[in-house]
Image: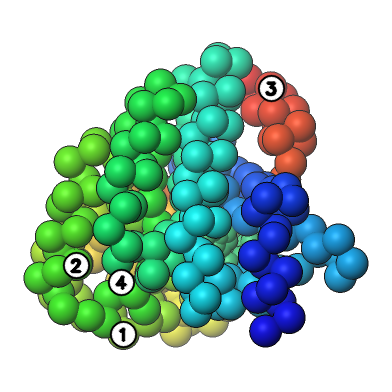
Amino acid sequence: VELEQDLRSALKNNEFKLVYQPQVELETMQITGVEALLRWHHPQKGLIPPDKFIPVAESSGLIVAIGAWVINQACGQLRYWHDLGFEQLSMAINLSARQFFQKDLFATIAQAIAAHGIEAGKVEFEITESMMMRNIEEIVDRLHHIKTLGVQLSIDDFGTGYSSLSYLKRFPLNKIKIDRSFVRGLPDDSDDGAIVEAIIAIAHSLGFTVIAEGVETAEQLSLLATKRCGEFQGYYFSKPCSVQALSALLLEHL
Ligand code: G
Ligand code: G
Ligand code: MN
Ligand code: NA
């Protein structure tokens, strides 16, 4: 309750910030995208992790306003990087369940893209399997509606939720993000290896790109590359970082 009270004033007091984690593609081993990750700097309690406050923001409904701020902020930041010359960079934005089922989401996305004059195809929205335990027709309709804006859609934390493989072919997705719990055991754990290989095979056969999360070591990267995982994200490349640090990384790789 106390957290909820503080969360209410956090937006207008400018206590939120986005950090950005690079995504690297196999083909060139260059940064081709970033994921925007929300941070809350509480004036007394310091940094509060999203795992703590996002559930509160969800249950109180505050996630709708916070989520709109995230979308707008991330699109503005993408414009900045495009103007710096990184025109191919994409921006992944996490959506929460409440946000996804909220009726203003379409307009919020449309406005942010228009306001910042960015190419819609460079913006990607991440949804999770746990959001999909609803009426499938409604979800399919919503996904198609959002897709008409020209944005990309990905499924986050893949393999951890109540996944039904049947929804994969019905949802207009572009990308599957392999959850980091399956990457952690690589290269030694042969079960994780088998799961990762199977996810990549399914993704490719359905025409989706695939990104591995939580890549922390050269050995993990090498195994994933052997299995033709198309993109990577994780501490091996970089932790989520500030605008300044990410700009430096982009310039370094130019
Ligand atoms: O960045 P970090 O590992 O601390 O994120 C923890 C969790 O919070 C992840 O599951 C991530 O998807 C989620 N998260 C981070 N930023 C956002 C955001 O802007 N919106 C939503 N809905 N979830 C986010
Ligand atoms: O659920 P989602 O994929 O949105 O979560 C992203 C979160 O994963 C971020 O909070 C980020 O801090 C965390 N993360 C990113 N890379 C790594 C990694 O290599 N190892 C671990 N343990 N966590 C990571
Ligand atoms: Mn994510
Ligand atoms: Na994830």
Q: Secondary structure at mark 4?
A: helix
The nearer-to-camera label among 1 and 3 is 1
**Label 2 to label 4: alpha-carbon separation:** 25 Å
Q: In front: mark 4 or mark 3?
A: 3
Secondary structure of the residue carrying tag 3 is helix
According to the image, label 2 marks what residue?
139
Q: Residue flagged by tag 3: what amino acid is it?
A: Leu
Helix, strand or loop at label 2? It is: helix
Would you name the residue on which mark 4 appears? 198
Three-letter amino acid code of the residue under disc 4? Ala
Task: Determine which residue is flagged by label 1.
Answer: 162
Nearer mark to the viewer, of 2 and 1: 2
Tag 3 residue: 251
Q: Of label 1 and label 4, which has the lower sequence position?
A: 1
Q: Amino acid at mark 1?
A: Tyr
Residue 174, percent from left and from top: 27, 50
Q: The residue under label 2 is which amino acid type? A: Ile
In this view, the mark in front (2 or 4)? 2
Task: Give the residue at x 46% y 60%.
Answer: 64
User: Which quarter of the rendering shows the N terminus?
Assistant: bottom right
Mark 2 or mark 3, earlier in chain:
2
- Residue at 67 percent across and 67 percent down: it is 7
In this rendered view, identify the residue nearer to me: 8 or 120.
8
Q: Residue 47, how many percent across, how many down?
A: 81, 64
Circle 1/circle 4 CB separation < 8 Å: no
